[in-house]
């Protein structure tokens, strides 16, 4: 009888221990299945990303733009300069401007590029122009040398046509009202005025100039040009 009680007590103890183990396993299972109450930052974003530098999830990122406060640079065009007339072929003097030619101060006072009627009226024996029309240039001279001078021999007057040809006074076969050979011999300070004639085609008048030079020099750099057109 005593053995049966002891055996029964042993069986009961074994069952009790087995029940405790089962309860502990169940409790462990429960603890494992319960989700954590801390929010997962990655789980709160649709793409699972996290903000840099510890920023709050979903906070917009800011990017510094380069400064555009500088003023626009403007470049001013250089002013256009026009060469002053110096009596050269490219920059002829205006009519009425005196120039030094040898021992003379020479001034081209007027140019008539179509002076056919004037020349024909100066002498009834004047022929018609050979090349198309007559032109006249009026000249004023002052002798500034130490001796004496004859303008018609000392100063040469030539018309440079716009057709790249030169027309000289001896090519004109007409007699003008104030010919250069009527100018007297001059001493220092003496002055004279006269006209010279040219026979040229009408096409030569566009862009024409008139130049004066020392009759007895071979240096073309001594020429002085006046605008004629």
Image: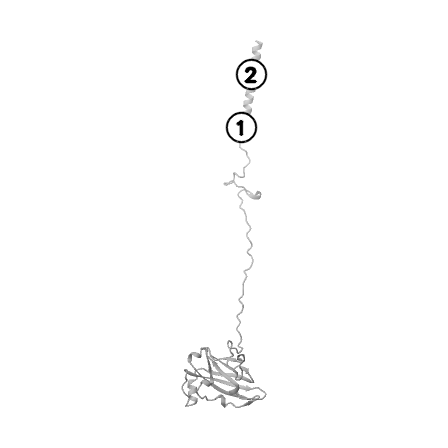
What residue is drawn where x is 56% and y is 22%?
Answer: 21
Quarter placement of the N terminus: top right
The local secondary structure at tag 1 comes to helix
Residue at image point 54% right, 29% down = 32
Color style of the picture: one colour
Closer to us: 76 or 99: 99
Location of residue 103 in the rendering, given as x and y in whole percent from the top left corner: 56, 85
The answer to whether residue 202 is above or below residue 31 is below
Q: Residues within 10 Å of mark 2 (few under 14, many from 20)?
A: few
Report the front residue among 31 and 134. 134
Checking the image for residue 222, the label placed there is: none
| Rendered location of residue 212, percent (x, y) | 51, 82
**Residue picked out by circle 2:** 12
The picture places residue 10, in percent across and down from the top left corner, at 57, 15
**Secondary structure type for disc 2:** helix
Image quarter of residue 201: bottom left
| Figure quadrant of residue 204 | bottom left
Indicate the position of residue 41 as horizontal and vertical percent values. Answer: 54, 39
- Depth check, front residue: 75 or 114: 114
Up-down relation of residue 72 to residue 35 (above or below)? below
Residue plotted at (55% across, 23% down)? 23
Q: CA distance from mark 1 to mark 2?
A: 27 Å
Q: Which residue is mark 1?
A: 30
């Amino acid at each position: 009888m005593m053995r049966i009680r002891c055996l029964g007590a042993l069986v009961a103890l074994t069952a009790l221990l087995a029940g405790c183990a089962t309860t502990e396993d169940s409790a462990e299972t429960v603890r494992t299945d319960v989700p954590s109450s801390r929010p997962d930052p990655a789980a709160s974003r649709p793409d699972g990303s996290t903000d840099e530098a510890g920023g709050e999830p979903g906070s917009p990122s800011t990017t510094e733009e380069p400064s555009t406060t500088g003023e626009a640079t403007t470049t001013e065009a250089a002013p256009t300069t026009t060469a002053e007339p110096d009596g050269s072929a490219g920059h002829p003097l205006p009519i009425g401007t005196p120039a030094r030619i040898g021992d003379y101060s020479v001034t081209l006072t007027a140019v008539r590029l179509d002076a056919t009627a004037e020349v024909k009226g100066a002498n009834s024996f004047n022929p018609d122009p050979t090349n198309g029309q007559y032109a006249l240039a009026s000249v004023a001279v002052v002798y500034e040398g130490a001796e004496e001078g004859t303008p018609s021999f000392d100063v040469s007057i030539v018309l440079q046509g716009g057709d790249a040809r030169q027309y000289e006074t001896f090519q004109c076969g007409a007699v003008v009202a104030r010919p250069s050979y009527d100018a007297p011999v001059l001493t220092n300070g003496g002055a004279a005025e006269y006209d010279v004639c040219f026979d040229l085609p009408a096409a030569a008048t566009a862009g024409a100039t008139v130049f004066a030079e020392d009759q007895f020099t071979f240096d073309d750099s001594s020429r002085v040009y006046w605008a004629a057109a």
